[in-house]
Image (cartoon, rainbow, N blue to C red):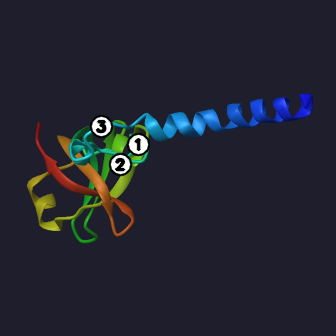
Amino acid sequence: MKHIKTLILVLALAAAPAAFAATSMEGMDMKSMGNMDMKSSAASPQAPRPVAAEIKKIDVQSGKVTLKHGPIENLGMSAMTMAFPVKDRASLKAFKEGDSVMATFDKVEGKPTVVEMRRP
């Protein structure tokens, strides 16, 4: 008889969390939950933001620009000097080496790319 009481107690304790979880959302309006973003912040990519940079080299023919830039958070890149393809090659004609710019970077066809570049 003592073993049966112990077994009943163990089963009751094991079932309690499941019963609590099932009733913890009772009374909630699930329609209003539709406005909530259910994704975790770690899973959502950061939006591209302009980054301060200095033009070191322009190659209009290849459509690339070498930039000394600050951290690019949305791509997880630290500050460095690197050549990037430019989405709009024609825009390179408006700049010269040594210009300070604000560059916005994103992945285009899987490659880090300058999607916009303007003077500050």
- Judged from this view, the residue extending furthest toward the front is 1
- The circle on residue 45 is 2
10 Å neighbourhood of mark 1: few (<14), some, or many (≥20)? few
| Front position among marks 1 and 3 | 3
Determine contact: label 1, label 2, CB under 8 Å: no
Which residue is the site of mark 1? 40
Q: How many marks?
A: 3
**Residue 120: image location, x then y, percent:** 11, 36
Which residue is the site of mark 3? 28
Q: Secondary structure at mark 2?
A: loop
Q: Nearer the viewer, residue 97 or 112?
A: 112
Q: Say which label, 3 or 2, has the lower sequence index.
A: 3
Residue type marked 1: Ser
Quarter of the view holding residue 12: top right
Q: Nearer the viewer, residue 56 or 25?
A: 25
10 Å neighbourhood of mark 3: few (<14), some, or many (≥20)? few
Q: Secondary structure at mark 3?
A: loop
From the viewer's perspective, tell me whether residue 23 is left or right of residue 6. left
- The circle on residue 102 is none
Q: How far apart are the two marked residues, 1 and 2, measured between alpha carbons?
A: 10 Å
